[in-house]
Image: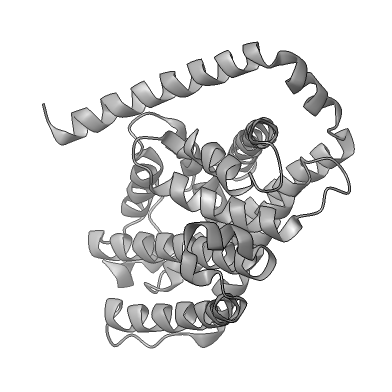
Amino acid sequence: MTRRKIIDILKWLWIVIVLLGAGWYFYRHFQEISQYLGTISITRLILCFLLLLTSKLVLSDISRLSLKKINYSIPYTEAMTITAVTQLGKYLPGGIWHFAGKFGIYKVKGISTKKTAQAMVIENLWLLSSAGVVGAVALLVSSKEVTCQYLRFLCAPVVANTVAFITPILWVAGLLVFEFFFFGKQKSNLGEFVLALAELIFIWLIYGLSFWLIFPPNVGYLSQIIGAFSLSWLVGYVTVFAPGGIGVRELLLAVLLSAFFKSGEVAIYAAIHRLLWVLAEVFLGGLSTLLFGIPVGVDDSASATR
């Protein structure tokens, strides 16, 4: 049996385990869950959904900027449609369909395999590294007891503050060094680089804020929730056996926020946020396709990238 086949089986098995586990938990704690659901504001749910749409619209521009790194320009609407449609593929067992879909569209548009790979690598590096940085800094500056619990050397406030200060600097420097070697002698556009960093930070702040809105009003802990969500998304994204990070993100959220909330409470709010997350992706994918279609035609500007 090949490694790919084993991973596919693990992904199907994981989905079954998550669904059965969630069903069993809801059955055993129905009364408690009902109480939690009663604390959720419809207005805040609507705001959460709108923030998720906003973040995903900004995420589309990250795809546009990653293509500009390989000297390929497309309109924002085209980048939004490609991103919105291909994002839906991550929920299919197999785990690579959102990558394969985007890779295929880029190839159809005439972009070479090498350039396509470069664009997708830098895009995912931006997303993963920014999630880690925003998550780590948000927890370090707001909730040192959480970081201290897992990394003992961070228990000293001066150490935690120093790490929180240095981490973003190292992140920016690391990206610049990586791009210098990854793209060779190609001149980097500083304005586009700064724009990408600003959009990445904005994405994680808004994603975290959207999750915070699921909690009851006046709950506080905004920074802690932003930090926990960013790190949980990161771990879920790189977990190969969990399509869309389902189950993994929710579990890690419950662990990281256990110092402030009951684990079951976090799990319920995370499940509701996951539902709104998927609805936002389906809505944006359907709407962008309806308005702009799926851009798969070859563009004349692709000639420079072949």
Q: Nearer the viewer, residue 214 or 47?
A: 214
The answer to whether one can see residue 151 in this image is yes
Residue in the image at 63% along x and 33% along y: 267
State whether residue 209 is above or below residue 272: below
Q: Residue 27 location, x and y as percent?
A: 64, 11
Residue in the image at 41% along x and 77% along y: 175
Q: Residue 35 location, x and y as percent?
A: 82, 23
Q: Nearer the viewer, residue 163 or 102?
A: 163
Side of 276 where 77 appears, left or right: left
Q: Nearer the viewer, residue 47 or 260?
A: 260
Residue farthest to the left, as pictured: 1
Q: Nearer the viewer, residue 208 or 228?
A: 228
Residue in the image at 66% along x and 48% along y: 259
Q: Give the position of the C terminus as an image quadrant.
A: bottom left
Q: Residue 67 location, x and y as percent?
A: 43, 66
State whether residue 102 is above or below residue 182: above
Residue farthest to the top, as pictured: 27
Q: Give the position of the N terminus as an image quadrant.
A: top left
State whether residue 111 is above or below residue 95: below
Task: Classify residue 38 by image quadrant.
Answer: top right
Give the colour scheme of this rendering: one colour
Q: Residue 163 location, x and y as percent?
A: 53, 78
Residue in the image at 48% along x and 65% along y: 152
Task: Classify residue 188 by image quadrant.
Answer: bottom left
